[in-house]
Image (tube, coloured by chain):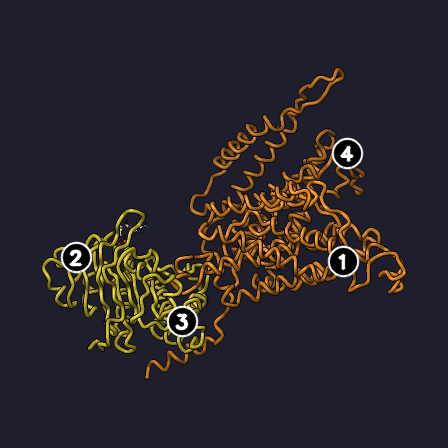
Chain colours: A orange, B yellow
Amino acid sequence: MQAETARMSVPAAIKDALLAALVMLGLSVPMLAWRTEQNMSNELILVPRWGAVAIACAIVFAGRLALSLFVWNRRAGARSVRVTRLLSIAGRAALAAAGALAFIACALVAWSLGHQASWIAIAAMAMVVAFLALLATFIVKASIGFEAARAYLAPAFLGFIAIFPIVAIHYAGWQGALKWIDNFGIQILIYVTLGWGLNIVVGLAGLLDLGYVAFYAVGAYSYALLAKQFGLSFWLLMPLAAILAAFWGILLGFPVLRLRGDYLAIVTLAFGEIIRLVLINWVDFSNGYAGISGIPRPSFFGIPFNADDDGFSAVFGLEFSPVYRTIFLYYLIFCLALLIAFVTTRLRRLPIGRAWEALREDEIACRALGINTVNTKLTAFAIGAGFGGLAGSFFAARQGFISPESFVFMESAMILAIVVLGGMGSLIGCAMAAILMIGGTELMRELDFLKTGFNIPGLGLSIPGFGADFDPTQYRMLLFGLAMVLIMIWKPRGLISTREPSIFYREKKAVSGSLVKEGHG
Amino acid sequence: MTATASAGPLLAVRGVKTYYGNIIALKGVDIDVRQGEIVTLIGANGAGKSTLMMTIFGNPRAREGAITFAGQDITNLPTHEIARLSIAQSPEGRRIFGRMTVYENLQMGAGVTGMRHFGEDIEKIFTLFPRLRERRDQRGGTLSGGEQQMLAIGRALMSRPRLLLLDEPSLGLAPIIVRGIFEAIRRLNREEGLTVFLVEQNAFHALKLAHRGYVMVNGVVTLSGSGRDLLANPQVRAAYLEGGHH
Ligand SMILES: Nc1ncnc2c1ncn2[C@@H]1O[C@H](COP(=O)(O)OP(=O)(O)OP(=O)(O)O)[C@@H](O)[C@H]1O
Ligand SMILES: [Mg+2]
C-alpha cells in the first residue's frame, strides 16, 4: 500500500491511528484484560489487567501513526532513484531508532510501575535488535549494491555454517558447545534439508504437498528397522532409506496426478496422517506409540563414537567426549544439505528441472511443448520424497529413538512454512527461513533473563522477570505467527522471491549490435 | 504460392466429434491442411475453433472421427507425443511461462528436438522478431501482449515444426502489431515452406493471408474455399467482415 498519491494529513493519520487502537481495544478485551487465578479458597477469580490493555492500545496507536506519517506517506517526487533510496534507508533507520527509543523510554517508565515491565523490556530489546539488523542490511546494500550483496550471500552463508562448530567451541567451550551444535546447528540443518527437499515439490514443480513429513517418517523408520533387524550399516541404509521414501513418493504421486492446488493439498495431508496412523496402530511393525529405541548410531567410517579402546576418541588419542559425535553429525548433515543443494541446482539446468518449473507455471503449455507431465510430476514427488527420506534416516541415527510423535502434521506445516517464507524455489531463502524459524524457537529456551530479570549496568537499573514458572517456549506459536505475518507484510513473496534464471544468454550484447549494422547494407 | 501436393494432406481431420462431458462442441468436422499451405479457420465466439485446435492435440480427445498427421493416425496419441511429431502449437491465451525469461521460454520450446539446433534456431527467431532479442533476459510475464504473442510463436517454432497451429495470434493486439505478426507468418510460409493452420477472429486479415479458409458455426464447418473467394462471399462479409477493417 504505497499511498503515494493519496497522502494523509496529520489529523487524518491521528484519526486512523485512533481507529486502529480501538480495534486493538476490542481485541484485547477478551484476550488480555482478565486473567484467571485461584484465590485462597480455591475459587477461580478474574484479575483485571487494564494496564496491559492500555499499553497494547498505546503501542498500536503509536505504531500506526508512525507508519502512516513516515512510511506510507512518502512523497512521490522527481527525486532520483538513488536519492529516494537513500532517503528511504535513512527514513526507515530513523523510524526504527525512534521506535527503539520510544520503547526504551516506555520500559523505563514501566519499570517504575514495576508490574508489566518485562513485556516492555522484551519489546524494547526486539526493537533494538531489529533496528541493528535493518541498519546492517541497508548499509551493506547501499555500499555494495543489491545484486552484489546477493552474490556474496551464499558464500558468506556457507562459510559461516562450515566454521560454526569451531566458533561455538571457541566461545562456549567443549561442553557448552554441545548444545549449540546439536540444538541449533544440527536441528536447523535438518530443517534446511527438509525445506530443500520439499522445495523441489512445492517450490519448483508447484505441487502443494501438506504431507511431506510422511517421507521423513518413512526414511526414519526404514533406517531404524533395517538397522535394528539386520544390523546393516548407516552408510548403506541412508541411500536405501532415500530410495524407499522415493518409492512412497511415487506411490503418492500416482493417485494425485490429476489434482492441483487445494485438492492436492487435502490428499497429501491425508497421506501424511495415514502414514502416522499406521505407525501408531501397527504395533508389531513399528512398536506403536512407544516408538523404537536403541537405534544404532552412525560410526566414523567404521570407528564407533564410544569410550571403548577402539572408539573414536581412543583411536585418535583424544579424551573421550560426546562432542565428537555431535560435530561429526553436524558435518554429516551439512554435507547432505550440500549434496541436495548441488543436485537441485544441477537439476534446474537439466530438462527435467526446467520441466518442473514450467509445470508450476502452466501445465497445458507444458504438454503442448512435448513434456510428459505425468513423468515430470512423479519425478518431482520421488526426488523430493527421497531427500525427505535422507533427512529422516539421519534424524533416526542422530536421535537413537523415534516415535510417531516426531512426524505430526505440525512438522509438515513447519517445513512448508520454511519453503513459502523462503520464497518458493530459492535455496538460500529456504535456508534463511529455516534459521529464522527453527533457530528462533530454539533461542527461546535461552531466554533465562525473562525468568530472572536483568540489570542495565550503566544506569544501575534492574528489570524484574516473570518468575521461575514463566516458560518462553510456550509463546513459540505466538511469535511464530508474528514472524510469519511480518515476513508476509514485508516480503509477500518470501524472503528471496526473485527467481534466478537457470540460464543466461551467453553471447555479448555486441553481437546484436553488429547484426543491426549489417542490416543497413 | 503453389502448395506442393504430396500423397495426401499433411493434416486431415475427418468427421471429428468432441464433447465436454455430455455437451457436444464439435459435431463432425472435416478439415484438410496440405503441405505448404496457410489455412485459416474463422468463426464466431464459441463456435468451437479452439476446441478443434485442442482436439488435434488430443486434449480433449475426439470421441468419434479420426485425425491423421503426415499419414499417421494421431487421434488417440497422448498430447506430449503429438507435440513430438513436428506439430507445434501456440495455444489460445499464449500461455507464456511468466516467471521464466524470454530465453528460457524459447529453450522450453526446443525441448522436443533435444536442443541440437538450438543456437541456429534461436538466431532465426531473433531475426524474425528482433524485439525478442532485445528482451531475451526479461521475464515472460512482464512482456507486452504483442511481445508475448511473438514469444508464443517463437517458442512453438523452436521445435522445428512442419505444421504450426496458431490460435488467435491477433487477440488484443494493436493493428500495427497484428500486421507485423501476420507478415512474419507469411514469411515463414514463403521462405521456409512452413505449413500453418490459423484460427482467427480477425477474419479480414486472416482470409487475406491464407490460401484457403474454413468457416465454423456451432461446431460444424459451413463454408470453405480459397481465401479470396471467402472474402468476396456475401455471407462471410455479412457475418464476419462488418464494421470496415479496410
Ligand atoms: N473446458 C470446457 N468445458 C466445457 N465446455 C467448454 C470447454 N471449453 C469450451 N467449451 C465450450 O465449447 C464451445 C466451443 O468453445 P471454443 O473455445 O472452442 O470456442 P472458440 O470458437 O474458440 O471461441 P472464441 O473465438 O471465443 O475463442 C463453447 O460453447 C464453450 O463454452
Ligand atoms: Mg477460442
Q: Chain of mark 2?
A: B
Q: Which residue is mark 1?
A: A298
Q: Which residue is mark 4?
A: A464
Establish if A355 lies above or below A448.
Answer: below
Say yes or no: labels 4 and 2 on the same chain.
no
With A166 as the anchor, is A495 left or right in this view? left
Crowd band around label 1 with a 10 angstrom C-alpha radius: few (<14), some (14–19), many (20+): many
Circles 1 and 3, Cβ within 8 Å, touching? The answer is no
SS of the residue at dot 2? Answer: helix
Given residues B62 and A133, the one toward you in this image is: B62
Q: Amino acid at mark 3?
A: Arg
- Indicate the quadrant where residue A302 lies: bottom right
Q: Amino acid at mark 4?
A: Pro
Q: Amino acid at mark 1?
A: Pro
Disc nearer the start of the sequence (3/2): 3
Given residues A326 and A391, the one toward you in this image is: A391
Q: Position of residue B135 (x, y in %)?
A: 41, 67
Q: Chain of mark 4?
A: A
Give the residue displayed 79% in from the left and 36% down from the top: A452
Mark 3 vs mark 2, CA separation in Å: 36 Å
Q: Which residue is mark 2?
A: B240
Q: Position of residue A403 (x, y in %)?
A: 70, 44
SS of the residue at dot 4? Answer: loop
Give the residue displayed 56% in from the left and 55% down from the top: A199
Mark 1 vs mark 3, CA separation in Å: 54 Å
Crowd band around label 3 with a 10 angstrom C-alpha radius: few (<14), some (14–19), many (20+): many
Q: Which residue is mark 3?
A: B133
- Indicate the quadrant where residue B74 lies: bottom left
The single residue placed furthest to the bottom in the displayed view is A521
